Image: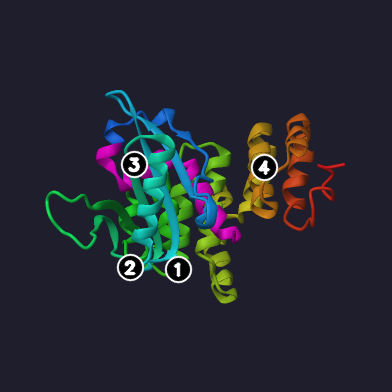
């Protein structure tokens, strides 16, 4: 799995309630969003074994629950609707419940959120069609999502149509919105990391960006630092040991995949903020968990 792909799924998992508010608002209004539980994704076995990107059980206010399956695709492809239908049928067989299928297209697809249907050979009222939600990101206007109240929207704006904004202006707008939010250090860092990864600048743009940031008041510059610089500064200043542990775990997962239990226990035992900060920096260049001293 490419690191950027993993990062996309990480941000959707962290802000899953926001995703429902953006892509399925009618469902979100009926849901107990604080009680979302993520389920085993390895449910397609045999010759057609695959792992779903995200699968969650969402409790409903009326009782019962809804299964929400999310896939992230680099671009829209004709075979995706049938793949979603296969997932939905197997999810129902495994967990027995209604399924909401949602696919996010980073490129291509119809812009914005829309319900779509996949029909078979027979189209008639008596025959069931498969319905799903498609969210085409690239064609959305970034300014509209930056104006929304959901923090996830501010991160996703980085892959949307900048409209009259330059890439530099869009990056600044995304980070300013994130930096001013009442979120934990870790959650702001995750969103900022997403913007850094999905809105990369050319060397020339980076120079312009630094000039633009340098012209801002000193007290506001921190929100425009690189992600690692920002988290190091905020983590040390605020003494957010637990936040730094969360940051370290996320970095490790992005670089090495699933973190072994022994390494998790080692991280949990760490009390030193400087040591946690050091590990956050070292993980960017380390070749293994053993090199970081997390496995013996």
From the image, state whether disc 1 or disc 4 is nearer to you.
Answer: 4
Read off the residue under disc 4: 249
Task: Name the quadrant containing residue 103.
Answer: bottom left
Read off the residue under disc 1: 167
Read off the residue under disc 3: 99
Q: Is residue 150 magenta?
A: no
Say which label, 4 or 2, has the lower sequence index: 2
Q: Secondary structure at mark 3?
A: strand
Give the residues drawn in magenta, as a range.
Answer: 1-27
Read off the residue under disc 2: 163
Q: How many marks?
A: 4
Say which label, 3 or 1, has the lower sequence index: 3
From the image, state whether disc 3 or disc 1 is nearer to you.
Answer: 3
Q: CA distance from mark 1 to mark 4?
A: 30 Å
From the image, state whether disc 3 or disc 4 is nearer to you.
Answer: 3
Is there a contact, CB below 8 Å, between mark 3 and mark 1? no
Residue 236 x/y as whole percent? 70, 38
Is there a contact, CB below 8 Å, between mark 3 and mark 2? no
Q: Residue at x 52, y 51 (%)?
A: 51
From the image, state whether disc 4 or disc 2 is nearer to you.
Answer: 4
Q: Is residue 232 left or right of residue 56?
A: right
């Amino acid at each position: 799995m490419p690191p950027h792909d993993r990062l996309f799924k990480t941000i959707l998992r962290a802000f899953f309630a926001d995703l429902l508010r953006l892509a399925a608002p009618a469902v979100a209004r009926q849901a107990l969003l604080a009680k979302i539980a993520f389920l085993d994704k390895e449910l397609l076995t045999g010759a057609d074994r695959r792992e779903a990107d995200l699968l969650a059980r969402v409790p409903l206010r009326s009782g019962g629950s809804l299964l929400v399956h999310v896939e992230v695709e680099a671009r829209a492809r004709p075979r995706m609707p049938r793949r979603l239908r296969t997932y939905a049928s197997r999810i129902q067989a495994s967990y027995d419940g209604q399924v909401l299928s949602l696919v996010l297209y980073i490129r291509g697809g119809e812009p914005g959120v829309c319900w779509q249907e996949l029909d078979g050979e027979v189209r008639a009222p008596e025959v069931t069609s498969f319905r799903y939600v498609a969210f085409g990101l690239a064609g959305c206007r970034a300014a509209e999502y930056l104006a929304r109240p959901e923090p996830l929207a501010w991160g996703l704006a980085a892959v949307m149509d900048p409209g009259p904004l330059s890439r530099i202006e869009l990056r600044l707008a995304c980070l300013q919105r994130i930096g001013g939010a009442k979120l934990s250090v870790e959650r702001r860092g995750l969103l900022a990391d997403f913007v850094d990864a999905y809105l990369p600048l050319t060397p020339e743009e980076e120079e312009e960006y630094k000039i633009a940031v340098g012209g801002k008041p000193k007290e506001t510059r921190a929100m425009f630092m690189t992600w690692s610089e920002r988290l190091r500064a905020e983590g040390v200043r605020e003494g957010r040991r637990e936040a730094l542990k969360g940051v370290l775990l996320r970095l490790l997962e992005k670089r090495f995949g699933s973190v072994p239990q022994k390494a998790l226990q080692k991280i949990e035992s760490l009390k030193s903020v400087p040591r946690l900060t050091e590990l956050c920096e070292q993980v960017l260049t380390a070749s293994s968990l053993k090199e970081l001293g997390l496995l013996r």
